[in-house]
């Protein structure tokens, strides 16, 4: 499959601290379908996320695990893509679709003077998704291209 998008949606502060940077679409051709554009967007977000994690790791932050939450968890491809670009398993907690909102509600309870210990209770894990070695091979040249685009000021 030919990539049809520059996989960088904005200039978020990590890893390059260029909030004024804009996303762009590159490599469009008559065969690009809405599905291909949708996938290119997912891939771009995943690669951007992986670049952010790599920048954090470069300064000593060592994440032990990743939880995937929100509406995107309805897509098995999304979780597999994230696990693959991170080269680390990702976990989906019980109720992953609403887990972000549930955690925000727990923070609000603590702000309203409930016991802060409630924040240390881990979420039950529904499933864990491992990196996909076949997908990693497909993504390798795209990841390299993404890195070159970042270095060039994408």
Image (cartoon, rainbow, N blue to C red):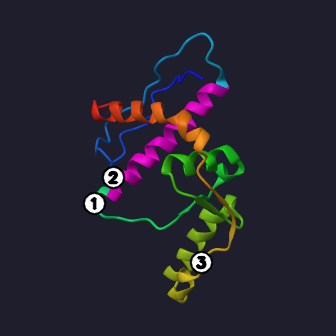
**Residue 96 visible to an observer of this rendering:** yes
Say which of 122 and 60 sits in front: 60
**Crowding at label 2, few (<14), some or many (≥20) Cα neighbours within 10 Å?**
some
Q: Are marks 1 and 2 in contact (CB under 8 Å)?
A: yes
Find residue 55 and name its label. 2
Q: Compared with residue 42, is residue 125 higher up or lower down, i.e. above or below?
A: below
Tell me the distance, in whole angstroms, between the alpha carbons under discs 3 and 2: 26 Å
Q: What residue appears at the point 54 percent right and 75 percent down from the top-left corner?
A: 108
Looking at the rendering, in which quadrant would you find the N terminus?
A: top right
Write down the region rendered in magenta: 35-57
If you read the primary sequence from the N terminus, does the residue marked by circle 3 or circle 2 appear first?
2
Q: Compared with residue 145, is residue 72 higher up or lower down, i.e. above or below?
A: below
Say which of 49 and 114 sits in front: 49
**Residue 113 visible to an observer of this rendering:** no
**Residue 74 point in image, percent of width and height:** 71, 50
Residue 18 sits inside the magenta stretch? no
Q: Disc 3 marks which residue?
A: 122
Find residue 71 and name its label. none
Task: Judge from the rendering whether residue 11 lies leftward or rightward of residue 118; answer left or right.
Answer: left
Element under disc 1: loop
Element under disc 3: loop
Q: Disc 1 marks which residue?
A: 59
């Amino acid at each position: 499959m030919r990539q049809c998008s520059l996989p960088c949606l904005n200039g978020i502060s990590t890893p390059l601290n260029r909030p004024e940077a804009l996303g762009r679409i590159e490599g469009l051709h008559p065969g690009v379908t809405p599905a291909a554009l949708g996938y290119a967007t997912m891939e771009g977000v995943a690669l951007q996320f992986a670049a952010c994690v790599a920048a954090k790791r470069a300064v000593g932050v060592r994440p032990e695990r990743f939880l995937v939450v929100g509406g995107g968890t309805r897509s098995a491809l999304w979780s597999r893509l994230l696990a693959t670009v991170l080269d680390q398993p990702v976990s989906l907690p019980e109720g992953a679709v609403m887990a972000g909102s549930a955690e925000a509600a727990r923070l609000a309870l603590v702000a309203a003077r409930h016991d802060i210990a409630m924040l240390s209770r881990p979420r039950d894990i529904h499933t864990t998704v491992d990196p996909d070695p076949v997908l990693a091979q497909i993504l390798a040249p795209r990841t390299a291209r993404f890195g070159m685009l970042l270095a060039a000021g994408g």
